[in-house]
């Protein structure tokens, strides 16, 4: 038992420490205000986002980039709300911005991938930028993508996402969970072993997308448009993949409004992990699951074997400290340190949450955008 505890913990601590080093290795990108040269097609699939669309569209209107060099393609995925007047009002107020609305045609088990493909097929420009309807972008967003493409000759660029602040425990729980993922994402890019990215803030070359047959092979999985594409490009041209570590390029989104929505989101994200092709991604995911299971097992075992207390304390405190370092660096980068307020409390429950989601994702259905997706 103790030997297994030592081996598993060594693997876990090595991974987290590597991500911490990678986070520091990957330097922040400073905005050089370089001359715009790249043209972008911004793609936004949406379904029943009546409340969020005005915020997103307003942020698009404030983008500091020549309007002749980007377009917006909104893809309606069978919305039943009154979204059209919002889009028409935006187009009327901003006639200088090329904004197109199309309807999605579902042909696979992944409506979002279908929506992205439909938009990419009609896009006018060479670079695709994706975000979500519940997001808000910053004015220098496209400038920094332009700069990164020019400086690094990239074909695929991942960029940061953060939650809009809300003073609730539910939000804090989601935020710390999300920051651990964001920190691991940045850290993995820093050690040149990318494992994650987020479709709410991605940029990729359209020719490369079609050359790799887009999302082909992943249509049966509802989510994963971001990570599966990352894996494809990593296999073909890893040197063309990079991370845009810049606060000015960060996209802001909202956390889920209740626990049920949050759990369904986590089940959706976790359900795709078994389909990963990247061995390192699988290794990290399995190690994180086993380490959290180990913490629970050790804690429970102390009720029957008193000498296990010292092992539990050593493992728990070591994990507490290392996880905090990575999350703290992420919060500092995102200028979001107040997100750490509940860290100590949430850490007590987090292993149970991780194990529950991981096991549930193997057999439990989940809901997404009022649709049920079955295992």
Image (spheres, rainbow, N blue to C red):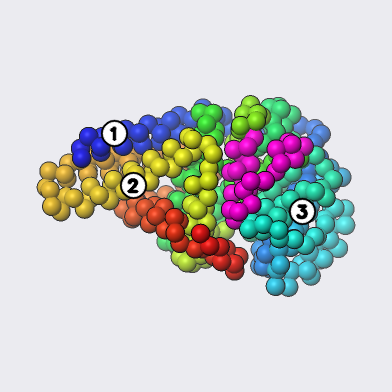
What residue range appears in magenta?
Answer: 207-233
The percent position of residue 296, horizontal first and vertical second, equals 27, 51
Secondary structure under badge 2?
helix
Q: Earlier in the sequence, mark 3 or mark 1?
A: 1
Q: Are marks 2 and 1 in contact (CB under 8 Å)?
A: no
- The image's mark for residue 264 is none
Q: How dense is the environment of label 1, judged by Cα within 10 Å: few (below 14), some, or many (20 and up)?
A: few
The percent position of residue 178, horizontal first and vertical second, equals 49, 50
Q: Is residue 153 visible?
A: yes
Q: Earlier in the sequence, mark 3 or mark 2?
A: 3
Spatial distance from mark 2 to mark 1, Cα to Cα? Answer: 14 Å
Spatial distance from mark 3 to mark 1, Cα to Cα? Answer: 48 Å
Above or below residue 12? Residue 59 is below
Indicate left or right for 78 with 343 as reference.
right
For the image, the number of numbered tags is 3
Secondary structure under badge 1?
helix
Residue drawn at the location 12% of the way across and 43% of the way down: 307
């Amino acid at each position: 038992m103790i030997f297994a505890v030592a081996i598993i913990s060594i693997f876990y601590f090595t991974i987290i420490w590597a991500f911490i080093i990678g986070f520091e290795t990957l330097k922040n990108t400073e905005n050089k205000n370089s001359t715009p040269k790249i043209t972008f097609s911004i793609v936004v699939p949406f379904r029943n986002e009546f409340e969020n669309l005005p915020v997103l569209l307003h942020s698009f209107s404030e983008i500091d980039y020549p309007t002749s060099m980007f377009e917006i393609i909104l893809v309606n995925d069978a919305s039943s709300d009154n979204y059209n007047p919002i889009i028409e009002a935006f187009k009327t107020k901003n006639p200088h911005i090329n904004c197109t609305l199309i309807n999605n045609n579902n042909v696979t088990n992944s409506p979002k991938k279908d929506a992205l493909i439909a938009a990419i097929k009609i896009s006018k420009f060479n670079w695709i930028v994706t975000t979500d309807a519940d997001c808000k972008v910053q004015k220098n967003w496209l400038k920094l993508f332009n700069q990164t493409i020019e400086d690094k000759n990239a074909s695929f660029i991942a960029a940061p996402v953060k939650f809009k602040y809300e003073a609730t425990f539910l939000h804090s729980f989601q935020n710390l969970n999300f920051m651990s993922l964001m920190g691991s994402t940045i850290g993995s890019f820093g050690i040149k072993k990318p494992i994650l990215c987020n479709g709410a803030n991605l940029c990729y070359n359209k020719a490369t997308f079609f050359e790799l047959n887009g999302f082909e092979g992943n249509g049966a999985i509802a989510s994963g448009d971001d990570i599966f594409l990352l894996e494809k490009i990593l296999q073909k041209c890893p040197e063309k993949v990079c991370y845009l570590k810049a606060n000015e390029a960060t996209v802001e989104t909202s956390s889920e409004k209740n626990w049920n929505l949050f759990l369904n989101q986590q089940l959706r994200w976790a359900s795709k992990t078994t389909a990963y092709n990247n061995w390192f991604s699988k290794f990290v995911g399995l190690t994180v699951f086993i380490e959290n299971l180990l913490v629970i097992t050790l804690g429970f075992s102390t009720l029957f074997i008193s000498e296990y207390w010292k092992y539990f304390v050593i493992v728990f405190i070591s994990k507490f400290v290392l996880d905090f370092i990575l999350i703290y660096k992420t919060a500092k980068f995102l200028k979001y340190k107040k997100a750490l307020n509940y860290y100590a409390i949430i850490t007590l429950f987090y292993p149970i949450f991780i194990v529950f989601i991981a096991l549930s994702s193997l057999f439990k259905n989940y809901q997404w955008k009022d649709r049920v997706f079955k295992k």
